[in-house]
C-alpha cells in the first residue's frame, strides 16, 4: 500500500508549490514597483539618471541634507518635493482601487463589478462640479479643499442609498448593480444640467477634474488617501477568508456561519469610504479595479488571501506606468493619467474577455 495510500503528501507538496508561486508573484510585483519608482523619478527635469534619482530618494529618507541653493539641494527638492508625491499617490490610488475591485467582485459575485459599480464616481463628479461651477460646498470651504470635500461626500451618497435599499428590500447582487447604474445616470444627468449653464473656462475646469491626474500632487494630499487605503486594505485582508465563502453562494456561506447581509453591508461601506477618499484627490481613474484583479486572478486563482495583496501591487504598478506615460507623451500638454489608464485598460480588459470566451470560460 505504501506509506501514503491517500496521496496526502503529494497533495501537500502541490499546495505548498502553488502557495509559493502566489507569494513569488507578489514579491515580483513589489520589485517591479520599486523599479518603476526609479524610472518615474528619472524624468525629473534635472537630467538625473536612475541611480542618481534613487540615491537622492533614499538619502532624503535617511535624513541627508544639503547646502541651501546648491545643485544637490535643488536636485533633492526636485526629486522629493515635486515628483515623489505624485509617485506615492499613484501607488496609493492604484493599490486602493485594485483592492476595492477585488472586494466588489466578490461581494456582488460578478467579475465585471468595480469600485464604481454603486454609482460612486458619478456622485463624486456631481459634488465636484457643484463646487466648481456653482461654488456650493457642503463644508462651506471654498477653493480646492471645498472641491475635495464635495467630491468625497458626493461619492458617498449613492453608496449610502444602495446600502439603505439593500437593508430594506434585501436586494440581490444583480439588482444592486442595476440600482448603481440607475444612480450613475441620475447623478450624471444632474451634473450635465449644471455644466451646460456655465461659461467655457469653468466648463473646461469641471471637465478636466473628472479625468484623473496626479499633476501638482504635494505631500499635504497624501495622508488622507494613505490612511484610508491602509485601513481599508487591512480590514479586507482580515476578511479575505470570509470573502472566499461568498464564492460558494449566499446560501452556502450562510450555512457555514457567515451573516451575508451584514458582511456585505460593512464591506460596501468600507469600499465606498476608501474610494471616495481616493478619487476626491485624484479624480476618476477607470479600469484599475477591473484589469488588475483579472490579470492577477488568471495567474494565481481566486483565493482572496493572495488575490488582494497581489492585485494591490499590480494596480500600483499599472498606475505608475500610466502616470509615467502621461508625463512622457506631452502633446500638446501633459496628458492625464485617467486618460492613459483608459487607453491601456480598455483593450486589455477586452482581450481578457475574448480570451475567456474563446476557451469556454464565459462569465
Image (cartoon, rainbow, N blue to C red):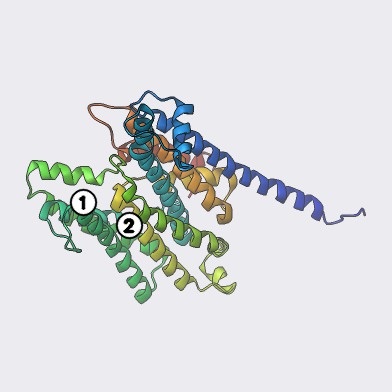
Residue at mark 2 to residue at mark 1: CA–CA distance: 16 Å
Residue 84 location, x and y as percent? 38, 39
- Vertically, is 234 above or below 319? below
Q: Quadrant of the N terminus?
A: bottom right
Asked whether the viewer can see residue 172, the reply is: yes
Residue 348 location, x and y as percent? 43, 37
Q: Quadrant of residue 189?
A: bottom left
Observer-side mark, 2 or 1, equals: 1
Q: Secondary structure at mark 1?
A: helix
Dot placed on the residue nearer the N-terminal end, 2 or 1 = 1
Q: Secondary structure at mark 2?
A: helix
Number of callouts: 2
Instruction: Find disc 1 in the rendering and name its residue.
Output: 144
In the image, 191: left or right of 306?
Answer: left
The residue at the point 57 percent across, 74 percent down is 257
Residue 326 location, x and y as percent? 33, 33
Residue 287 location, x and y as percent? 38, 44
Q: Residue furthest front?
A: 67
The residue at the point 33 percent across, 56 percent down is 277
- Vertically, is 84 above or below 333? below
Q: Are marks 2 and 1 in contact (CB under 8 Å)?
A: no
- Vertically, is 341 above or below 261? above
Asked whether the viewer can see residue 362, the reply is: no
The residue at the point 41 percent across, 35 percent down is 321
For label 1, count other residues whose C-alpha is less than 10 Å away and answer few (under 14), some (14-19) or many (20+). Answer: few
The residue at the point 38 percent across, 45 percent down is 89
Instruction: Find disc 2 in the rendering and name its residue.
Output: 276
Q: Residue furthest bottom?
A: 168
Q: Residue furthest top?
A: 47
For label 2, count other residues whose C-alpha is less than 10 Å away and answer few (under 14), some (14-19) or many (20+). Answer: many
Q: Who is closer to the viewer here, 140 or 96?
A: 140
**Label disc, if present, on residue 35 of the rendered structure:** none
Amino acid at each position: 500500500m505504501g506509506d501514503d495510500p491517500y496521496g496526502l503528501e503529494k497533495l501537500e507538496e502541490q499546495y505548498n508549490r502553488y502557495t509559493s508561486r502566489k507569494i513569488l508573484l507578489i514579491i515580483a510585483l513589489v520589485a517591479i514597483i520599486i523599479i518603476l519608482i526609479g524610472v518615474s523619478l528619472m524624468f525629473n527635469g534635472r537630467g538625473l539618471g536612475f541611480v542618481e534619482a534613487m540615491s537622492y530618494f533614499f538619502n532624503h529618507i535617511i535624513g541627508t541634507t544639503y547646502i541651501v541653493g546648491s545643485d544637490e539641494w535643488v536636485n533633492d527638492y526636485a526629486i522629493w518635493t515635486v515628483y515623489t508625491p505624485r509617485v506615492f499617490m499613484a501607488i496609493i490610488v492604484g493599490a486602493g482601487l485594485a483592492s476595492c475591485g477585488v472586494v466588489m467582485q466578490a461581494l456582488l459575485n460578478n467579475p465585471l463589478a468595480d469600485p464604481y459599480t454603486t454609482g460612486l464616481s458619478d456622485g463624486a463628479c456631481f459634488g465636484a462640479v457643484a463646487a466648481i461651477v456653482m461654488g456650493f460646498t457642503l463644508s462651506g470651504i471654498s477653493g480646492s479643499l471645498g472641491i475635495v470635500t464635495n467630491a468625497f461626500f458626493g461619492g458617498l451618497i449613492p453608496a449610502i442609498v444602495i446600502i439603505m435599499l439593500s437593508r430594506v428590500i434585501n436586494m440581490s447582487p444583480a439588482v444592486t448593480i442595476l440600482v448603481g447604474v440607475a444612480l450613475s445616470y441620475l447623478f450624471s444627468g444632474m451634473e450635465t444640467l449644471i455644466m451646460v449653464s456655465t461659461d467655457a473656462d469653468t466648463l473646461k475646469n469641471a471637465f478636466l477634474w473628472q479625468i484623473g491626474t496626479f499633476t501638482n500632487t504635494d505631500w499635504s494630499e497624501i495622508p488622507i488617501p494613505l490612511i484610508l487605503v491602509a485601513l481599508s486594505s487591512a480590514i479586507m485582508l482580515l476578511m479575505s477568508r470570509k470573502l472566499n465563502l461568498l464564492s460558494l453562494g449566499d446560501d452556502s456561506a450562510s450555512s457555514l456561519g457567515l451573516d451575508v447581509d451584514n458582511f456585505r453591508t460593512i464591506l460596501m461601506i468600507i469600499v465606498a469610504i476608501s474610494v471616495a477618499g481616493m478619487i476626491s484627490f485624484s479624480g476618476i481613474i477607470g479600469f484599475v479595479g477591473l484589469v488588475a484583479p483579472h490579470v492577477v486572478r488568471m495567474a494565481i486563482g481566486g483565493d482572496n488571501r493572495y488575490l488582494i495583496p497581489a492585485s494591490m501591487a499590480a494596480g500600483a504598478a499599472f498606475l505608475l506606468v500610466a502616470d509615467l506615460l502621461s508625463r512622457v507623451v506631452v502633446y500638446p500638454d501633459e496628458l492625464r493619467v485617467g486618460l492613459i489608464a483608459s487607453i491601456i485598460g480598455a483593450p486589455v480588459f477586452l482581450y481578457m474577455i475574448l480570451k475567456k470566451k474563446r476557451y469556454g470560460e464565459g462569465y
